[in-house]
Amino acid sequence: SIMNEKSKCFDYVNHLTGIMKKVEESQWQAIDQGSRKIADSIEKSHSVFIFGASHAGILAQEMFYRTGGLAVLNAILPSEFMLNTRPVVQTSAMEKLDGYPSIILDNTPIKEGDILILHSVSGRNTAAIEMAMTARERGIFTIGITNMTYTNAVTSRHKSGKKLC
């Protein structure tokens, strides 16, 4: 029984290792470009912002205000997108609301030359897509984090038909 549990554990670890290897092989160039852009921006006294809606917002919470973390990293955490919102299904409705992501950026001290990292597992909802489009119009470099297998299997919910990627 213990050996069977150990085998299942290693199956899981091997599965995760396979996913990470796939990311390394297919996304290394983008990761390298993004990290160099972040370093260059910080060197020029700019800031890095991160946003994700609902569960994707957990990454934003995890990345900022960490001991030993990147002090110039700022999380964009509108309360109506966070998982402590009740009812929690409201977060899903909010991330599909057209126009609201631009209002969030209007009320964030992000400026031209800064970096905006956007996390969306599906890459299909209005919040991340509109925020990326608005940021780019304002001269803010955007970096998207999304699950390409998932995003390729779904349609966009944004009026443009675009996805985060």
Image (cartoon, rainbow, N blue to C red):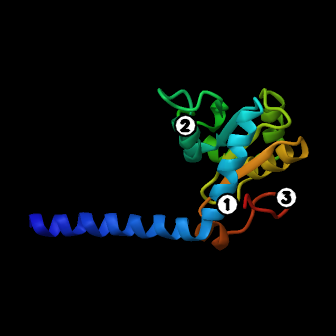
| Tag 3 secondary structure | loop
Picture layout, residue 35 above or below residue 113: below
Residue annotated with mark 1: 30
Say few, some or many: other residues with alpha carbon within 10 Å of mark 1 (under 14 / 14 to 19 / 20 or more). few
The amino acid on which the numbered mark 2 sits, given as a three-letter code, is: Met
How far across and how far down the image is residue 6, in percent?
18, 64
Q: Nearer the viewer, residue 143 or 165?
A: 143
Give me the residue at 79% from left, 49% from top: 132
Q: Nearer the viewer, residue 20 or 36?
A: 36
| Tag 2 secondary structure | helix
Sooner in the amino-acid sequence: mark 2 or mark 3: 2
Give me the residue at 80% from left, 34% from top: 105
Distance from Cα at disc 1 to Cα at disc 3: 26 Å
Distance from Cα at disc 2 to Cα at disc 1: 19 Å
Mark 2–mark 1 contact, CB under 8 Å? Answer: no
Residue annotated with mark 3: 159
> For residue 135, what is the image quadrant?
top right
Residue annotated with mark 2: 63
Picture layout, residue 93 above or below residue 75: below
Q: Nearer the viewer, residue 19 or 123?
A: 19
Quadrant location of the C terminus in the rendered image: bottom right
Judge from the rendering whether residue 138 lies leftward or rightward of residue 17; answer left or right. Answer: right
